[in-house]
Image (cartoon, rainbow, N blue to C red):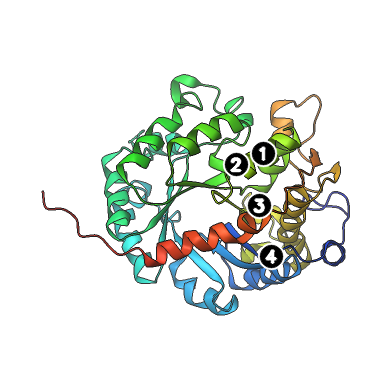
Amino acid sequence: MADDSNLTNLDYRAEAVRMGPPCVEIIDAHAHVSGLHAAVILREAMKLYGISHIFSMTAVIEQIDALREIFEGNICFIAVPNWRDPDRLHAHGGGYAQRIRDFHAKDVRIAKFWTAPRGIDIGHEVGDPNLMRLDNPVRVEALQTAFDLGMTFMVHVADPNTWFETRYADQARYGTKASHYETLEAALERFPTRWIAAHMGGWPEDLTFLTGLLTRHPNLVLDTSATKWMVREISRHDAQEVRDFFVRFRGRLLFGSDIVTSDEHLNNASNANEMDAKAHSKESAFDLYASRYWALRTLWETNWIGQSPIADPDLAMVDPLRFRPADSPQLRGVALPGSVLPDFYRGTALAVITEAQLRPARNRPQT
């Protein structure tokens, strides 16, 4: 029976063989690897689809050493707040600076700053609507801490247009999508380190906007994670426009999947949360992880056109009369030229992590 990760009943192991290896081994620059048993299943999917290394926002610091062993050292970690801390004001405010130092002590050299519009809701709930803004003094403290440690920054600044049309439609509360980039651009100037803007900068729907953003900020690179989002929106663009964008910004774009692993994916729990309910056995967990690599390699490498095997509820969110939550969009491959694939798949990520590893800590100026 098909599930939301395999609507078209693909054999993802056989598909990997049919697809063959990529032009270079791929580095997945954006994932959330947690759960040691699930990590083993992810590792199988990675090997099948030619993914040699992965960058992970692992929530549990105590799992870092074990995950390094599972991935034979081919995993790079990214510092993240403690999302499980019931004191969210502390976890996303003053407590994050210390957590960055804790990650840095584990040889982590990238720090994540999540400033998505959903953060406005979290802020209201804890009594500080501006909690997640990059210009909030407690966030500036965390940014300064990471900067002084010589770290690279990752940022999640915006969400899909489909969400701004629906759950963020109240502009008095959430602002416009464009308004969320004002604090980002100011932070890019204030902290002249390398920045990675997740999910194609949060605006894969508008390549013209991204062109301006990359042109204005030479210290910025974009990862192309969030598989469903990329498949839906990149497929809507003219393929030549996408190819031209990747050629123009060769060396500024990173492959990413946004795969989230959890040992809960191996259980058939009736009370699982939304993320944990995406799989319920070893095989469905494998399909969940492998489907992302199948879809992304198909999108970027080929000119294949067909139904995506991954359900995309955003379609029904915007047009519930036409789509059901289990429907999927058309995937239209853009067949990126061979001249850019090696950098996109591997070279840019190697440059980013090497730069992060070599960048020395800074002494904070006396005030």
Disc 3 residue type? Val
Residue 60 locus on image (x, y percent): 47, 65
Mark 3 neighbour class, 10 Å CA radius: few under 14, some 14 to 19, many 20 or more: some
Of residues 234 and 92, the one nearer the viewer is: 234
List the residue tagged with mark 1: 244
Residue at coordinates 44% horizontally, 35% vertically from top-left? 216
Can residue 117 be seen in the rendering of this structure? Answer: no
Q: Residue at x 50, y 61 (%)?
A: 351
Q: Is residue 210 left or right of residue 46?
A: left
The Cα–Cα distance between marks 2 and 3, rounded to whole angstroms, is: 10 Å
Mark 2 lies on residue: 248
Q: Nearer the viewer, residue 1 or 310?
A: 310
Q: Earlier in the sequence, mark 1 or mark 3?
A: 1
Q: Cα distance, mark 2 to mark 4?
A: 20 Å
Q: Tag 2: Cα neighbours inside 10 Å, few (<14), some, or many (≥20)?
A: few
Dot label at residue 24: 4
Position of the N terminus by quadrant: bottom right
Residue type at mark 1?
Answer: Asp
Residue 312: image location, x then y, percent:
73, 41
How far apart, in angstroms, are the residues tagged by discs 4 and 3? 11 Å
Label 4's element? loop
> Considering depth in this image, is 308 or 132 the residue closer to the camera?
308
Query: How many numbered marks, from 0 up?
Result: 4
